[in-house]
Image (spheres, helix red, strand yellow):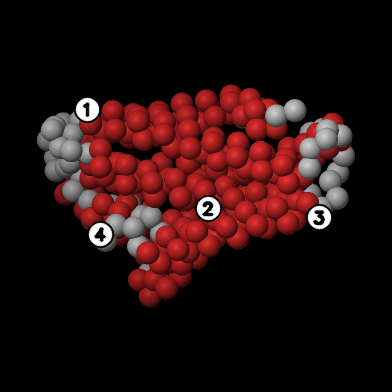
Amino acid sequence: MNVFIVEMKAHRNVLIIWAVGIIFMVVAGMGKYVALSSSGQSMNDLFAQMPKSMQTLFGIGIFDLSKASGYYGMLFLYLALMATIHAIMLGANIISKEERDKTAEFLFSKPISRNKIITAKLAAAFMNILIFNIITLVSSIVVVGKYSKGESVSGEIITLMVGMFVMQLIFMFTSTAIAAVSKNPKTATSISTAVLLITYILSMVIDLNGKLINLKYFTPFKYYEAKNLILGSGFQLSFVILSIVIVLSMIKTTYVFYKRRDLSI
């Protein structure tokens, strides 16, 4: 029994749905850019009239929204949110679905160690995240490039996608760890989603109140912001190291608790 192939097949349809969703978001987002840019009013002036709280909500303030790349930089926040939601749900589901569906007895009756099972599951989850990210990358380059008016956008989009990929891994492995620790498989997705929403809201609060800037280390959404990756210093070493530590810690937690737990079969 090849657990990796089984998991890839099990999540194939879900991946297709999420891929279609992210492509639609890219197309719809850049379609809005075209509509606004053809209205005759400066988009920078238009969005500058919004209250600061609204500018923060939409990720406005630093990008040149008259350019396709600048508008995509604003759109990136929502692409990253969608991508991390997919990662959270994937990670929690791939660990706990046998218990939830009462099929754990069949899986563990096979002559396969728990270490091999969890390795195959994590590899399948990683591959799903990678495919999702590549689809987002390609669709973004094609769509944004169409409206860039000769502006080179591929390099900036690739940089953003690398940052998004790391965020996806952070949240995906966090959710696998939560699912492995949780005694109730049905609550793993809820807890993981709550973690994501709290960190997302925290990133918004930090933008609204500069005095809370030191809390940025507690939300991955501040690690790879578009404004820093494109217009700032790029990838910050402290955030890269912290990301590696979180991912490795969550992987270790997943292995340790998955092997120890008494599965509901």
On the rendered structure, is 142 left or right of 217?
A: left
Residue 201 appearing in the image:
no
Numbered label attached to residue 232: 4
Circle 3 is placed at which residue position? 260
Marks 4 and 2 sit apart, C-alpha to C-alpha, by 22 Å
* Front residue of this view, candidates 138 and 37: 138
Tag 2: residue type?
Answer: Ile
Is disc 2 surrounded by few (<14), some (14 to 19) or many (20+) residues within 10 Å? many
Which circle, 1 or 2, is nearer the viewer?
A: 2
Compared with residue 74, is residue 128 higher up or lower down, i.e. above or below?
above
Q: Which residue is located at x 29 percent, y 33 percent?
A: 141
Q: Are marks 1 and 3 in contact (CB under 8 Å)?
A: no
Q: Mark 2 sits on what residue?
A: 170
Above-or-below relation of 44 to 265: below
Mark 3 crowd level (few <14, some 14–19, many ≥20, 10 Å Cα)? few
Of circles 2 and 3, the one toward us is 3
User: Of tags 1 and 3, which is closer to the observer?
Assistant: 3
Q: Amino acid at mark 1?
A: Lys
Q: Secondary structure at mark 4?
A: loop
- Foreground of the two, 115 or 210: 115
Residue drawn at (18%, 34%) of the image: 148
**Residue 193 at x, y = what percent?**
60, 49
